[in-house]
């Protein structure tokens, strides 16, 4: 009876050793895939491409706002003066801050891909504990990496930055208001939309002169 018990115990131990060996093999395969040094370069490439994408948007906004400011200063007669210098400084500060935002978006893209990989690694390691074989583990890990990179790349450039030049001074809006005012006067309307040439405003006087 003791011999049979020992045999069963040895068989159970052998089965457990085999199970642990499979878990280790699967775990090693998963970690080897997720720890591939080439993946670090992919994070860096994603961060750079994302930063470049948003930097392009920043440069587009900078060009538009620089032209608007130039025209506004010229229209208001402030080009080359202290106000023009101040507004140019503000525009430059906004540009620098916008570039920082673009760089931050790039960093977040790379970090997001890394986080997605770590979550996938944890999930795969859990499956390894349940008996997932090493070959399947390696295949699934590779698929997860590919899927994560595609998803992270798509999400990283899904949106524009929005207007990052909100500190641009009032000179442009003021020049637009003056333009609108001059346009109104050209068509016969003053600040209070009074008709030109006194027609209407002097009606009473004219009528009075005509009265007997």
Image (spheres, grey):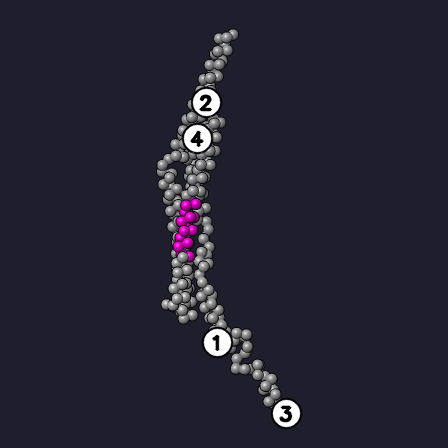
Q: Which residues are magenta?
A: 94-109
Quadrant of image for the C terminus: bottom right
Which secondary structure class fits the magenta region best? helix
| Nearest-to-viewer mark from 3 and 1 | 3
| Nearest-to-viewer mark from 3 and 4 | 3
* Residue shown at 44% from the left, 61% from the top: 168
- Cα distance in 3D space between marks 4 and 1: 77 Å
- Earlier-in-chain disc, 2 versus 3: 2
Rendered location of residue 193, percent (x, y): 54, 75
User: Does residue 134 appear anywhere in the picture?
Assistant: no
- Cα distance in 3D space between marks 3 and 4: 109 Å
**What is the number of the mark on residue 212?**
3
Rendered location of residue 29, percent (x, y): 40, 30
Q: How many marks?
A: 4
**What is the number of the mark on residue 19?**
2
Q: Are marks 4 and 1 in contact (CB under 8 Å)?
A: no
**What is the number of the mark on residue 59?**
none
Residue linked to disc 1: 186
Q: Quadrant of residue 151?
A: top left
| Nearest-to-viewer mark from 1 and 2 | 1
């Amino acid at each position: 009876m003791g011999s049979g018990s020992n045999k069963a115990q040895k068989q159970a131990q052998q089965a457990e050793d085999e199970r642990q060996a499979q878990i280790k093999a699967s775990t090693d395969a998963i970690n080897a895939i997720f720890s591939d040094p080439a993946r670090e370069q992919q994070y860096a490439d994603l961060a750079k491409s994302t930063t470049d994408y948003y930097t392009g948007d920043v440069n587009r906004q900078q060009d538009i706002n620089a032209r608007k400011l130039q025209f506004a200063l010229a229209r208001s007669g402030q080009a080359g003066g202290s106000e023009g210098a101040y507004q140019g400084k503000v525009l430059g500060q906004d540009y620098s801050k916008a570039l920082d935002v673009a760089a931050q978006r790039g960093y977040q893209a790379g970090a997001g891909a890394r986080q997605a990989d770590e979550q996938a690694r944890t999930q795969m390691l859990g499956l390894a504990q349940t008996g997932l074989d090493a070959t399947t583990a390696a295949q699934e890990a590779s698929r997860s990496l590919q899927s994560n990179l595609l998803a992270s790349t798509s999400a990283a450039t899904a949106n524009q930055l929005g207007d990052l030049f909100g500190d641009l001074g009032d000179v442009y809006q003021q020049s637009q208001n003056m333009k609108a005012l001059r346009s109104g006067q050209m068509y016969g309307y003053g600040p209070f939309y009074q008709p030109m040439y006194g027609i209407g405003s002097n009606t009473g006087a004219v009528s009075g002169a005509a009265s007997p």
